[in-house]
Amino acid sequence: MLSSDARVALRPDATFRELIAERPPGFWRALARPALVLLVIAVGLPIAAVHQVTVKLVLTTAAAWSFIVVVQMAIAAAMIASAPSRRVSFLHAFDLWFAGHVPYSLWILAIPLVTAVPAGTPHELMGLAFIVPLVWTTVIVAAFCRVVLGLAAADASRRAALHLATVVIVVAALATWAAGGPAAIVSYVAHRLGRI
Amino acid sequence: MARTLATIMFALGILIGTVSDRVTYRPPPRSGEYFVLAGDFHVHAAPGDGSLTPWTLRDEAARRGLDVIAITNHNQFLADRLVPLLSADVDQPIVLQGEEVTHSDYHLIAVGIDHVVRADRPVVDVVAAIHSQGGVAIAAHPMRAFPGYTDAALAAVDGTEVAHPERVERYRRDYIETFARARRMNPHIAPIGSSDVHNTPALGDCRTFVFARERSARGVLEAIRAGRTVAADERGRLFGDASLVEQVRAARPRGPSDPHRDWRRASVLLTYVGLAGVVLL
């Protein structure tokens, strides 16, 4: 009943073992999962922001936020290319890397639910909730490294930690840029804490 | 089978949303020699810390009964670079370039500028830099915690946000007190209502009614400089000169328009459930 992506989220090791035995995807098929991630962003954000969804909204939002998927693709490429012991082709591993998207996709799909509550505090709540996909995806990445890339458990854990650090740095850099710089972040946090 | 059904729901949802999205911009009412324009001068956009691009924000502004919006991301101008690419359609809301000049001591909205204003100076100097570009400067959510809003700073700005969708009542009182303090030093300071929208459906919840001689960027900026504005908060309270407030009430400005609400809701539900199904099933 559940998709292979959902099963990766729930039982990553066992599901990755099943998926590496399947026929490897072609070039275009390998882009299907990144496209699904972009679609989740391009639909979730407009629904949250305007409670509306149209072709124009989806296309312009996809264009504006496509860099997120491009960054993920670059991280995936670096992770896979640096593991010569991998058990499948590069394209197959690339496709399976994006099978781990469900935690972040669920986080994005939760944004419209939060913004639908008038008295909600979407920024703070979603910021705190971001820790869930962060940790959950680290577990999936570790399983990916063990099963798909064929790494020893200790090496897989190191790579998962490196991935976690990379994501935190990228997200922090983006948030700092969008907020107007480090001083603006400090000021924002100080004002929020001042409310307590 | 379940995934196919989810895909059909998703596609149907987007189709219904697209077909039922008939937004027509309604011209603003007039009051004497003035157009009564509804504006939101504090809007965050993508790329930046807003979800939506200037293109889609303009459509949403039309839905929300706004005549003018300003893109005001923090200390950056990337989304503003897209504004000149918008079609020059007179039957669409005006989109102005702007910035939320963000400093630990103050946040200051610049509207009608054409390049970024650095946030490394006191408010008075930043206001001068904004004026040198032909823009107007508006104190953004000026709570007491912002030490940058000295008397000299408030005397220099063109407007202050007196209506802002703040959840903390203490801060709402700060905005009103700051406006009163600014008015004592500058009787023509413009009361401003802004949504400060990032990624929630709040565009225009707080808004500014602008008494403009012409429906253009120039007309809007001139009216703000002259203080011919009325701020409205999301609770329906109006702030400004009593005579202008009366004129706003008499002009009965348009509110949000949602002619196909049921279809829009059905579209969102189908799309959302369909997409969740595609991800999980």
Image (cartoon, coloured by chain):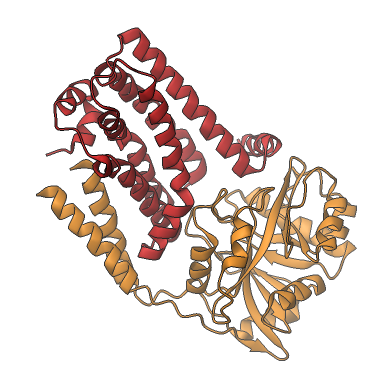
Q: Nearer the viewer, residue B177 or B232?
A: B232
Furthest residue toward left: B1
Q: In terms of image quadrants, where is residue B222? A: bottom right
Position of residue A106 measured from the top left corner of the image (x, y, whole percent): 33, 40
Residue A63 is left or right of residue B168, and the answer is left
Q: Is residue B59 above or below residue A101?
A: below
Determine the residue positioned at 26% across, 51% down.
B275
Q: Is residue A145 above or below residue A5?
A: above
Position of residue B124 measured from the top left corner of the image (x, y, whole percent): 87, 52
Say whether residue A121 is visible. no
Q: Nearer the viewer, residue B155 or A80?
A: A80
Residue B22 is left or right of residue B141, and the answer is left
Determine the residue positioned at 60% across, 44% down.
A178
Locate the C terminus of chain B by quadrant.
top left
Position of residue A187 measured from the top left corner of the image (x, y, whole percent): 69, 37
Give me the chain that's red: A
Give me the chain that's orange: B
Q: Nearer the viewer, residue A116 or B126?
A: B126
**Number of callouts:** 0
Say whether residue A63 is visible. yes
Residue A129 is left or right of residue B255, and the answer is left
Q: In terms of image quadrants, where is residue B173? A: bottom right
Determine the residue positioned at 50% across, 71% down.
B64
Position of residue B197 measured from the top left corner of the image (x, y, whole percent): 56, 56
Q: In terms of image quadrants, where is residue A28? A: top left
Residue B156 is left or right of residue B196, and the answer is right
Q: Is residue B129 above or below residue B261?
A: above
Determine the residue positioned at 29% across, 41% down.
A33
